[in-house]
Amino acid sequence: MSGHSKWHRIKHQKEREDQRKGKVFSKLSRKIVVAARKGKDPEKNIDLRNAIEEARAKHMPKENIERAIQKGTGELPGVELTEIVYEGYGPGGVALFIDCVTDNKNRTTAEVRHIMERHGGKLGAEGCVSYLFNKKGLIIIPKGKISEMTLYDAAIEAGAEDIKEEEDVYEIMTSPADLHKIASALSGNNIPIEECELSYIPTTEQRVEGKDARKLLKLLLGLEDNDDIQKVYSNFNIPDSIMAEMES
């Protein structure tokens, strides 16, 4: 989508700020806790394996990962966490698929609704936009750290479904089940991984311009700033010029 690489940089800048505040590790810890309820062995629990892979890509300390697993299995005390997904629409009619982990569903619902309405969005019914996304494994590789040929050869040999070249990164798509295998293969070839996660990839794009585009970007940042929200997926297509305003 137009401006996607710029949006990636905006999110990455924000993530660095959040990491200094401990917010990134806190969100990842919650994800691991929920996944670990299905079993503490990553080789038998694909959700836990993928959550750990994402945490490692974000340089989460090993002891933090182990502590989160122990909370999920009940070996250490912790709050009761629940996964919940919200669906809705942003300015310009774009689809929003919001993945959350919370210890208080009522609070999170109220906060998500408030953020949405404040920035011109609206919550919808379950299933209203999920059909517009496909669940995939997503691996982000920064450009300039490895040759293009080396990356393509390693990714294809490992079984990647697709490789897309953006302005400053490569995006490698995998089946959800193959995410860990392909990430491990890339690491084994000394290919640096910037992000590794399960993602919801839009099947269509919704073009948004002008005031709606600016409102949408503020909405996305507002949602991602909420501690209970893990990820926000959208099918927006925004002009590069408006993305550049966000970077300045």
Image: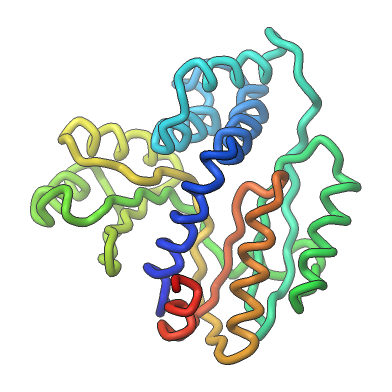
Residue sitting at the far front:
248
In this rendering, position of residue 63 left or right of residue 87: left
Q: Residue placed at 46% from the left, 77% from the top?
A: 243
Expressed as whole percent of the image width and height from the top left, the position of residue 132 reads 59, 70
Instruction: Using the image, determine if residue 186 lies above or below residue 142.
Output: above
Image quarter where the N terminus lies is bottom left
Image quarter where the C terminus lies is bottom left
Q: Residue placed at 55% from the left, 82% from the top?
A: 206
Expressed as whole percent of the image width and height from the top left, the position of residue 221 reads 62, 63
In this rendering, position of residue 33 left or right of residue 106: left
199, 231: nearer the viewer: 231
128, 107: nearer the viewer: 107
Residue sitting at the far right:
106
Instruction: Using the image, determine if residue 206 lies above or below residue 119.
Output: below
Q: Residue placed at 24% from the left, 34% from the top?
A: 187
Q: Residue placed at 40% from the left, 70% from the top?
A: 6
Expressed as whole percent of the image width and height from the top left, the position of residue 244 reads 42, 78
Splitting the image into 4 quarters, where does residue 184 fall? top left
Expressed as whole percent of the image width and height from the top left, the position of residue 99 reads 66, 51
